[in-house]
Image (cartoon, rainbow, N blue to C red):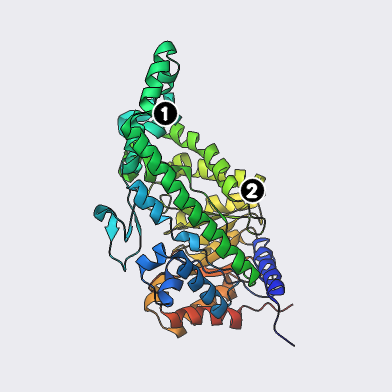
Amino acid sequence: MGEKSPRKLFKERKNRIFEAIALKEPDRVPISPMTTYWPMLYKGMTHKEAMYDLERSSQAIIDTALEFKWDTAPSVVVMYPVRAFDILDSKLWKWPGAKNPDQRVSDNSPYQFCEGEYMKADEYEEYFEDPTSYVIRKLIPRHYGALSGFKRFPSRNDMINGYMAMLGVPLTFNSPEFKASSQALEDALKEVQIWFQKGIESMMKLQRLGFPPIFAGIAQAPYDVVSEFMRGMRGTMLDMYRKPEELLRLIDSITKPMIEGSLKLSILPEAPLVFIPLHRGADGFMSDKQYTKFYWPSLKELMEGLIKAGKFPMPFFEGKYNSRLNYIEEFGKEYPGKIIAWFDQTDIFKAKEIFGDKICIRGNVPGSLMVTGTPNQVEDYVKKCIEIVGEGGGYILDGGVSGIPDESKPENVKAMTDACMKYGIYKK
């Protein structure tokens, strides 16, 4: 028999993934590793080169996919649009090669998120009174230094102020500060468009080679949005005690827009999975009572909204979620075969015992094992995952800490892949 065509491979791989999501036994346990820099580092690039040269990064991903023959291909869009970040003077990230030295890390370091108290504790009412005005005039200028001119953007009151609006609004738009920020935004959007187009081209090329995308949509837990992009972790945690009603109202105001925004981006029919990285709901971040009140309801609403739109939420439970498994189980009872629970450090074997045949589980080869372990140790762990978590179907093999860590040994990545092919066959 000759080699299978890319079209046939694409169909087989896609079916393998979606049969696992539907809690069935495919022909084999699917392997779908998430990666960030690993393919590029594996092909000899630096972190800086990976971010600023998307053509080479895309080729590195293609070469890696063809070599390892996984069931999905990683995405190049995890290399964020740093040229746009440079233009906007983004304060939200530090990355290799950044023009602003304050936002720069070394050429061989990964990008880092920069949390801050971008919304002050006494600004809740200002936000509630006019969220659009607050975001434009306060939040965006704090996120992006080059958009400081938006502080002068007319408020709602300015624009309905009769004859004064006729004079004040045009003068604001004509100010040097506002013009400079508007030009920076226009230039940055051009770079984002180029970045997005290169991402689509890379994804389509991989599909033509037989590889479905790992996902094509992303969302965040509303609590995490507040904690990371607005109040900061410290501020949000204090608000659970000092301003609980305001915090809940803010979270609620974000939930519906998060659903709508995610659906706008998740438009590829071949990839209805929506990645939801979770950061602040893990064990130790808050009590179970606080999780029930502040974190879970909006996350549940988000996932329900995605499911109703025909999508499959794929929450990544970063850290340990052993004390939250009952919430996930209850959701699985209501929506069996509709979500993919991707675990990092959670006891994946306990999760399988609790979930049974209600939820597809993804993960969780430990990052420490991929970086410091031996191929035999990796093989043994993968074998255990397949035998226990993969029993009866509903399992997708991946790494724990956001998939394959950047520092993973190539021989361990190969061992993980080979073990899946060796032990993952379902006997019909």
- Residue located at (39% from left, 56% from top): 82
The residue identified by callout 2 is 307
* Residue 341 in picture, x, y percent from top left: 55, 58
Residue furthest to the left in view is 102
Q: Quick one: 125 or 282, which is closer to the camera? A: 125
Q: Residues within 10 Å of mark 2 (few under 14, many from 20)?
A: some
Q: Which of the 4 image quarters holds residue 426?
A: bottom right
Label 1 Cα neighbours within 10 Å, binned few <14 / some 14-19 / many ≥20: many
Label of residue 174 in the image? none
- Alpha carbon separation for disc pair 2 and 1: 31 Å
Which residue position holds label 1?
133
| In front of the other: 168 or 105 | 168
Any part of residue 352 in sight: no
Quadrant location, the N terminus: bottom right
Q: Amino acid at mark 1?
A: Ser
State whether residue 416 appears in this view: yes
Going by the numbered disc 2, the residue's amino acid type is: Ile
Q: Is residue 281 positioned above or below 405 on the image?
A: above
In the figure, residue 428 lies in which quadrant?
bottom right
